[in-house]
Amino acid sequence: MRIDVLTIFPEMFPAVLDASMVGLARERDLLDVHVHNLRDWAHDRHRTTDDYPYGGGPGMVMKPEPLFEAVDQIRSETPVSGRVIFFTPAGRVLDQDLAEELAREDRLILVCGRYEGFDERALSLADLELSVGDYVLTGGEVPAMIVIDVVARLIPGVLGHELSAVDESFTSGLLEYPQYTRPPVYRGMEVPEVLLSGDHARIARWRREQSIRKTARLRPDLVERAELTDDERRAADQETSRCRDHAEEGPPDE
Ligand SMILES: C[S@@+](CC[C@H](N)C(=O)[O-])C[C@H]1O[C@@H](n2cnc3c(N)ncnc32)[C@H](O)[C@@H]1O
């Protein structure tokens, strides 16, 4: 997969692109990332990419000309024109389903905003306006890194263990079961006996049950959409109402 990033802060990217799984994906030629400085498409000697907002108001707005020219040129560099993503807090919120959809693309072009965001006309270039959550960051660079990271680990051959991504939170519609490693007892806290039993069928059942209970406790909204058997649904509902009752009781009286 090829990913192009358009930013006025290209220097933010090397650490993320060189480390860990993303670095490995690039080393193995499974991921090809090109970071472009939007200022290369500016029209003046100060390499200006922003201007005052029409109508007044605080802050600056990203000018349309460098964005249009950069996206046109970057798109034309390969026969696959790619899916153009503009980062904005007003966009569709990224989740695991969307990440899986993006990981199936041959090429992504990620456009990072700054200041008060983009001139509205530039958004006509976007195939997707994407948010990484309901909060406002200073720029689209961290969201671009999030997309690169989430997509890289879904590319076949990137994760050491092919099943690692299959079992995880959100992939099955549920949160992942609790994980433990050595030592078996730490500060009086014991690893559940079933995990030391070597009985793989029992372990699988325990993990499924824990996964459902944890999701019911922490994210009841996900449980509603998950595929569960009737028994599992009953257990999840019990866990959700147990947590609700507990929360309504409040802290114990002094
Ligand atoms: C300070 S923000 C602009 C916020 C804009 N004035 C608004 O109220 O929607 C600057 C840039 O950061 C990026 N950004 C900030 N928060 C984001 C989020 N939650 N998801 C994706 N991009 C975000 C966008 O590219 C945005 O253009």
Image (tube, helix red, strand yellow):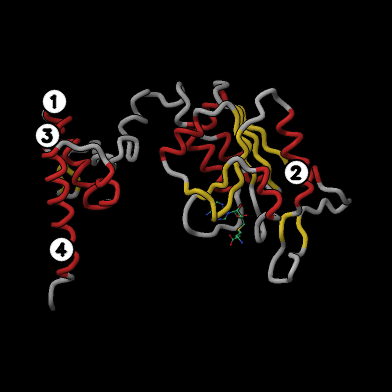
Work out how far the residue at label 3 is from the one at label 2, CA to CA, in angstroms: 58 Å
Disc ID at residue 228: none
Specify whether 191 is left or right of 163: left
Proximity of marks 3 and 2: CB atoms separated by less than 8 Å: no
Dot 3: what SS? helix
User: Where is residue 209 shown, x and y percent of the image?
Assistant: 16, 39
Q: Which residue position holds label 1?
A: 201
Q: Which residue position holds label 4?
A: 246
* Labels 4, 1: front one: 4
* Labels 1, 3: front one: 1
Q: Which residue position holds label 2?
A: 68
Task: Indicate yes or no: mark 3 CB to ligand 1 under 8 Å.
Answer: no
* Labels 2, 1: front one: 2
Q: Which residue position holds label 3?
A: 194
Q: Residues within 10 Å of mark 3 (few under 14, many from 20)?
A: some
| Callout 4 amino acid | His
Residue plotted at (76% across, 34% down): 73
Of all residues shown, which one is farthest toward the bottom? 254
Of pointers 4 and 3, the one earlier in the residue sequence? 3
Q: Residues within 10 Å of mark 4 (few under 14, many from 20)?
A: few
Dot 2: what SS? helix
User: Where is residue 170 shown, x and y percent of the image?
Assistant: 34, 40
| Callout 3 amino acid | Val
Residue 168 appears in view: yes
Specify whether 47 is left or right of 1: right
